[in-house]
Amino acid sequence: MDVKAIAEKIDYHQQNGIEMVKITNEYPELTVEEAYDIQKLTIQRYVERNDPVIGWKMGLTSKAKQISMGVDEPIYGRLTESMELREPVLHVKDLIHPKVEPEFAFVMNKELKGGNVKPRDVWAAADGIYLALEVIDSRYENFKFTLPDVVADNASSTKFVLGSQVFSPSYTQWDQVKVTMHKNGEEVQSGYGKAVLEHPVHSVVELTKMMNRDNLTIKPGMAVLVGGITEAVSVEEGDILNVEYEGLDTLNLAINE
Ligand code: OOG
Ligand code: MG
């Protein structure tokens, strides 16, 4: 198996928004470790195109989501500069079957590393928390994959947007925040921050541990998307999303061509 060639192929499908057959159809023995190598090589290609890594994302952090996707552990992915939307408008022309989910983003001001990180280490290293929307767009047909497939495809990462307001980590109890998503004026999803591993801080703990296995650390300045608070919602051109984080703010996203 040529991991470099697979990375090149995935990069092509990510850049062009063209769906592909799952990697595990051809390589049923693909391991999660090999899949992280493929992810790393794929994102190295982004970096070589002057599109640096600016953060990390956790995915599949709720049991419900693991069950609906048919996997049994969380995953991480890499966020690069070109994935961050500068304004709350998503262009779907070059995407395959995009979905949007509400998240929180922790932004760090100290390095977090090691296999023994505790919640208080995360709080000590976190500068602020942003409300965030993540756009995921699996490159695989019908959004169907196994764990190694989705890891190789950078955890379906596509775009994300942060709210304008930063909140102090101690501003509220993040697990208690209620989030309600409306699409074209109708409620489509709702949930609480605790959907993310009982408390979003645990997602950053888990990410640090998973990264430590690969000799990686979360560097100062990096943003971390902690995982979807509700199920992801499919969007198409013309849709308008309003996502209310009770007591905090509302994020809007317009879906354009
Ligand atoms: C994997 C990415 C999931 C999340 O927050 O759970 C994710 C997928 O479902 O395609 O970003
Ligand atoms: Mg997500």
Image (cartoon, rainbow, N blue to C red):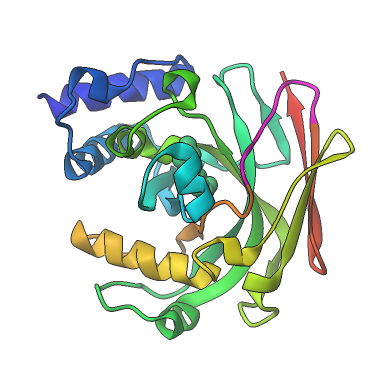
Residue 14 in the image, given as x and y percentages of width and height: 42, 24
Is 126 left or right of 44, judged from the image as shown? right
Is 97 left or right of 148, judged from the image as shown? right
Residue 116 in the image, given as x and y percentages of width and height: 27, 78
User: Which quadrant of the structure image shows residue 148?
Assistant: top left
Where the N terminus falls, by quadrant?
top left
Give me the residue at 37% from left, 38% from top: 154
Is residue 232 within the magenta segment? yes
Residue 80 appearing in the image: no
Question: Magenta: predominant secondary structure element?
Answer: loop
Residue 3 in the image, given as x and y percentages of width and height: 16, 29
Give me the residue at 80% from left, 61% from top: 249
Is 243 left or right of 184, judged from the image as shown? left
Give me the residue at 64% from left, 22% from top: 92
Q: Residue furthest right?
A: 185
Where the C terminus falls, by quadrant?
top right
Q: Is residue 102 above or below residue 18?
A: below
Residue 93 in the image, given as x and y percentages of width and height: 63, 16
User: Which quadrant of the structure image shows residue 159?
Assistant: top right
Part of the protein shown in magenta: 231-239
Is residue 42 within the magenta segment? no
Q: Residue furthest left?
A: 1
